[in-house]
Image (tube, coloured by chain):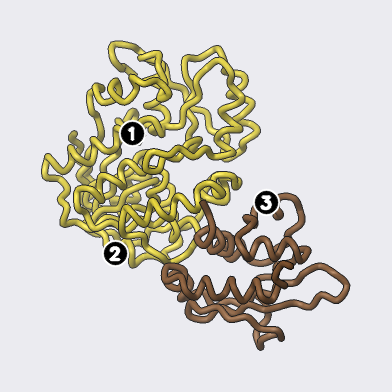
């Protein structure tokens, strides 16, 4: 990929949820690559200015001592805010549209932007991660609940909090279909969306990041009207925020720990993917 | 002298019942929780959750326990009074909990929402 005048070689390796194998790869690549992105797992969760470290993410990251290991959180907090505001400025979304964020604590920047812009938002963190049928409807309650839960929950095995490996391939569980039905926009992690989406999503929009060509097919089959991937697509697959962050680290030579980071990321040319789907299976793309 | 376990559990039920958020969250969580302190003469105490309201019982209610919690009495007192998060004694092997993973997580969430930082 090309970024800021640099040509960056991106290689994906999937461990299918095997932490030990992933840690071994990270140790082997340490010092040999410019940046390593963690996909399918987060290291940091940002909530209203506080950063919580996920134990399993830290375990992986600490396998490298020379190469920066990033998880996309340095991008999500700035980039995804801009994506929402840009979609709104272009008239593609509107604050009258109800939003279901399947998980908001892993992308607080996006959730906060929706709340601040006046969208009716349901944050489904308790619903989809803990099967507690309790929609979080305000930013204040999201922050209050997150502050209580995150210090302990970030210490749990990541597999208890998020579908990994075989869990990602299970048939959808539609028990919470009504929250999808009530929303015009469904946003957040695509593995969670796919784990719980119902068969009919006619006319709805999806804002997510990592999707494959098969995912787009599955959305089309459900009648999804449009999909936004918050990061650019390459060869039919969108980059995860972790890859984008790793590429930015490689290009700029600074990490999210650097004071210049927010400014430098905000200067990046905003690229995301807008796909208009139709039930005749012709997807039309634009930005 | 510290409160006995029964008084601690009464307090736990009261706090849950007075917390409108927890009552709403638990409105469809109808469960029986058996709590047993390890020791020679230990007999379980029972917390029954119905439509979001928790009640403490000295004798087994009609239904079987969905969730069984077992630990030394001082650990149970600390966990159900908010002095200790369940995760710590659980990770040390002092707290045993049997039940579905969803129910275990809910019990964690209830204690954290009452007393978490």
Q: Colour of chain B?
A: brown
Label placed on residue A181 = 2
SS at mark 3 in the image: helix
Is disc 1 on the same chain as disc 3? Answer: no
| Disc number lying in front (1 or 2) | 2
- State the image coordinates of residue A265 (x, y, percent, origin top left): 30, 24
Residue A149, numbered circle: none
Is the residue marked by circle 3 packed among few (<14), some (14-19), or many (20+) residues within 10 Å?
few
Residue A177 in the image, given as x and y percentages of width and height:
36, 65
Q: Residue at x 48, y 57 (%)?
A: A171
Q: How far apart are labels 1 and 2 at the CA level?
A: 28 Å
SS for dot 1 = loop
Figure quadrant of residue A254: top left
Closer-to-camera residue (A232/B4): B4
The residue where tag 1 is placed is A236
**Chain of the residue under the numbered disc 3 shown in the image:** B
- Badges 1 and 2: C-beta atoms under 8 Å apart? no
Q: CA distance from mark 2 to mark 3?
A: 40 Å
What mark, if any, has residue B88 been given in the picture?
Answer: 3
How many C-alpha atoms fall within 10 Å of the one at disc 2: few (<14), some, or many (≥20)?
A: some
Q: Quadrant of the N terminus of chain A?
A: top left
Name the subunit of mark 1.
Answer: A
Closest to the camera, between mark 3 and mark 1, is 3
């Amino acid at each position: 990929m090309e970024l800021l005048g640099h040509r960056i070689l991106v290689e994906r390796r999937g461990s299918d949820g095997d932490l030990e194998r992933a840690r071994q790869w990270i140790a082997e690549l340490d010092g040999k690559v410019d940046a390593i992105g963690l996909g399918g797992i987060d290291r940091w969760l940002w909530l209203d200015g506080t950063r919580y470290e996920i134990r399993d993410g830290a375990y992986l990251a600490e396998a490298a001592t020379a190469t920066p290991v990033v998880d996309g959180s340095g991008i999500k907090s700035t980039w995804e805010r801009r994506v929402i505001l840009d979609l709104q400025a272009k008239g593609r979304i509107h604050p009258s549209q109800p939003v279901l964020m399947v998980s908001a604590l892993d992308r607080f920047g996006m959730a906060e932007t929706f709340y601040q812009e006046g969208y009716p938002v349901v944050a489904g963190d308790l619903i989809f991660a803990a099967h507690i049928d309790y929609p979080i409807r305000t930013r204040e309650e999201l922050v209050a609940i997150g502050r209580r839960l995150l210090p302990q929950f970030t210490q749990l095995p990541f597999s208890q909090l998020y579908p990994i490996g075989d869990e990602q391939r299970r048939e959808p569980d539609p028990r919470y279909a009504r929250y999808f039905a009530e929303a015009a926009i469904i946003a957040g992690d695509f593995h969670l969306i796919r784990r719980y989406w119902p068969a009919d999503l006619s006319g709805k929009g999806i804002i997510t990041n990592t999707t494959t060509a098969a995912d787009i097919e599955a959305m089309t089959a459900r009648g999804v009207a449009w999909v936004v991937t918050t990061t650019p697509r390459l060869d039919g697959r969108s980059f995860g925020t972790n890859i984008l962050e790793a590429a930015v680290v490689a290009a700029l030579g600074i990490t999210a720990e650097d004071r210049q980071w927010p400014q430098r990321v905000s200067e990046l040319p905003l690229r995301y993917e807008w796909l208009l789907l139709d039930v005749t299976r012709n997807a039309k793309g634009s930005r | 002298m510290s409160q006995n376990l029964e008084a601690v559990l009464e307090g736990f039920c009261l706090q849950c019942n007075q917390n409108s958020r927890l009552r709403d969250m638990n409105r469809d969580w109808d469960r029986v929780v058996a709590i047993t302190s390890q020791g020679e003469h230990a007999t379980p105490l029972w917390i029954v959750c119905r439509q979001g309201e928790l009640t403490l019982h000295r004798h087994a209610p009609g239904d079987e326990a969905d969730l069984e919690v077992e630990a030394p009495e001082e650990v149970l007192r600390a966990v159900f009074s908010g002095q200790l998060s369940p995760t710590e004694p659980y990770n040390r092997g002092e707290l045993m909990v049997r039940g579905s993973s969803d129910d275990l997580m809910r019990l964690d969430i209830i204690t954290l929402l009452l007393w978490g930082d």
